[in-house]
Each structure stands twice: as C-alpha cells, then as structure tokens.
Image (spheres, grey):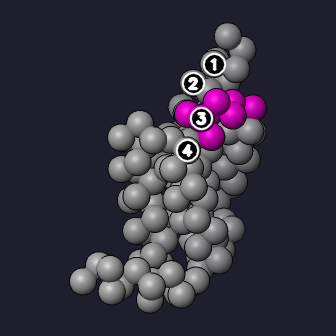
Amino acid sequence: MLTQLRPRMAQCTRCPILAEYKDKMATVLAFLDRPQEALRYAAESLDLVTGFCGPEAAATLTGMHTYAVLLIDVGRLDEGTSMLARVLATQTRVLGADHDDTRRTKHALDVASAAVRA
C-alpha cells in the first residue's frame, strides 16, 4: 500500500500530510544517528510547510527549529545557531516570549551558543 502511495505523495507539493511524513522521517533518522539523511527530510518538510502555512506559522517555525538543530548536529554550528536566533525572534514576536515553543528554541539557542563559544 505504501509503495502505491509514494508516487502520488511525491506529486503533492503543497500537501500537509506529506510534510508531516517527511518531518517524522527526519525525527526517526536523527534518532537512528543518520543526521545527513534527517537533514534532507527536514528541509523537504520545511519547504512544504512554509509553502502551505506561510513563513510565520507555528508549524513553519517548529520546522525551522528542527532544521536548525539538525544543522548543528551535522557540525554546521554557525548556520544552525543563526537560524535558531531568527526562529527565536519570530516566535517571540508571533507567539510571545512565554510560549512553550519560544522557550524551547531559546534553550536550544543557549546550548548551541555555548557550543560555538567552546
């Protein structure tokens, strides 16, 4: 069944189900210590979510957070930290400083910034 769905899903460029599938694949691959593959899936998911929901939607910001953390995981510290800073600024403006997602991104940025300084 899944093999029959894959070609149809690949054609659906604005499909939130496909974005969620790719996001879940990124999570599993990161858990399996396959960060390069996880990064690819996270990028594809982020592109879909951004196109479907817009650049400042909560789902997009969560995808950006995930992608930034994966950048850090593959050793691209400066790029990941910079992206986390942008996500944090947008989340603070859109969701508020006390929102759980904003706090989670602030914590990730603090940890990443400490790693860059070390």
Mark 4 / mark 3, whichever is N-terminal = 4
Q: Quadrant of the C terminus?
A: top right
Write down the residue under mark 3.
74
Image position of 98 with respect to 116: above or below? below
The residue beneath circle 2 is: 111
- Observer-side mark, 2 or 3, equals 3
What residue is rendered at 60% in x and 59% in y? Answer: 43
Instruction: Please tell me whether mark 1 or mark 4 is closer to you in this view.
Output: 4
Distance between mark 4 and mark 3 Cα atoms = 7 Å
Looking at the image, residue 31 sits to the left or right of residue 66; the answer is left
Name the residue that disc number 1 marks.
115
Residue 88 found in image quarter: top right
Evaluate if marks 1 and 2 touch, with contact meaning CB atoms under 8 Å apart. Answer: yes
Q: Position of residue 96 (x, y in %)?
A: 59, 52
Which of the marked residues, 3 or 1, is nearer the chain's N terminus? 3
Kindly report the distance in space between the C-alpha atoms of the residues bearing marks 2 and 4. Answer: 21 Å
Looking at the picture, does residue 53 appear above or below residue 76?
below
Task: Please name which of the two marks, 1 or 2, marks the residue nearer to the observer.
Answer: 1
